[in-house]
Structures are given as structure tokens and as C-alpha cells.
Amino acid sequence: MSRLLAAALTVVAAAALAVGAAFGAVALLEAPPDQPNTPLVTYETNGGER
């Protein structure tokens, strides 16, 4: 196998790995959280009071 062909295959493999990692990171970021985002402490307020 010539050096040029080996270099070209290495570049293609690295590009495919980078694209796969990018799609994986986006998929992880768009995943819903494990638990709902509810406050631990709530304060009761009267209707007009702020």
C-alpha cells in the first residue's frame, strides 16, 4: 500500500470518527434530564402580594 493511499485512508477514518463524535455529543446534549426540574423549596404567596 502506498504512503499516499495510507494517508488518505487515515484522513477519511479520522473525519468519520470526528463526525460520529460530534453526532454523539449532540445526542447527549439533547437527551432529557433524568429527573424533572422541580424546585425543592416553594413559598406560598397570597394572590396580590409580591
Image: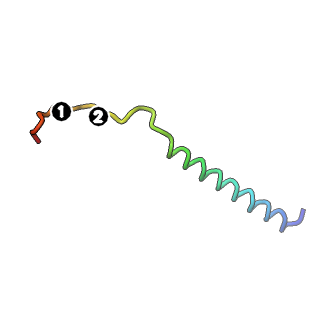
Residue 38 relative to residue 47: left or right: right
Q: Nearer the viewer, residue 8 or 39?
A: 39
Label 1 secondary element: loop
Residue at label 2?
39
Q: Quadrant of residue 16?
A: bottom right
Q: In the rendered view of the protein, which quadrant contains the N terminus?
A: bottom right
Residue at label 1?
43
Q: Is residue 5 above or below residue 45?
A: below
Q: Which residue, as the protein is rendered here, is positioned at the far right?
A: 1
Identify the residue shown where x is 82% and y is 62%. Answer: 6
Q: Which residue, as the protein is rendered here, is positioned at the far left?
A: 49
The kind of residue on which mark 1 rests is Tyr
Q: Is residue 26 above or below residue 6?
A: above
The kind of residue on which mark 2 rests is Pro
Q: Nearer the viewer, residue 15 or 47?
A: 47
Q: Nearer the viewer, residue 21 or 31?
A: 31
Whole-number angstrom distance, CA of label 1 to CA of label 2:
10 Å
Identify the residue shown where x is 79% and y is 64%. Answer: 8
Residue 44 appears at what percent x and percent y? Answer: 16, 31
Q: Is residue 12 above or below residue 27?
A: below
Disc 1 to disc 2: CB gap under 8 Å: no
Residue 17 appears at what percent x and percent y? Answer: 68, 53
Residue 45 appears at what percent x and percent y? Answer: 14, 34
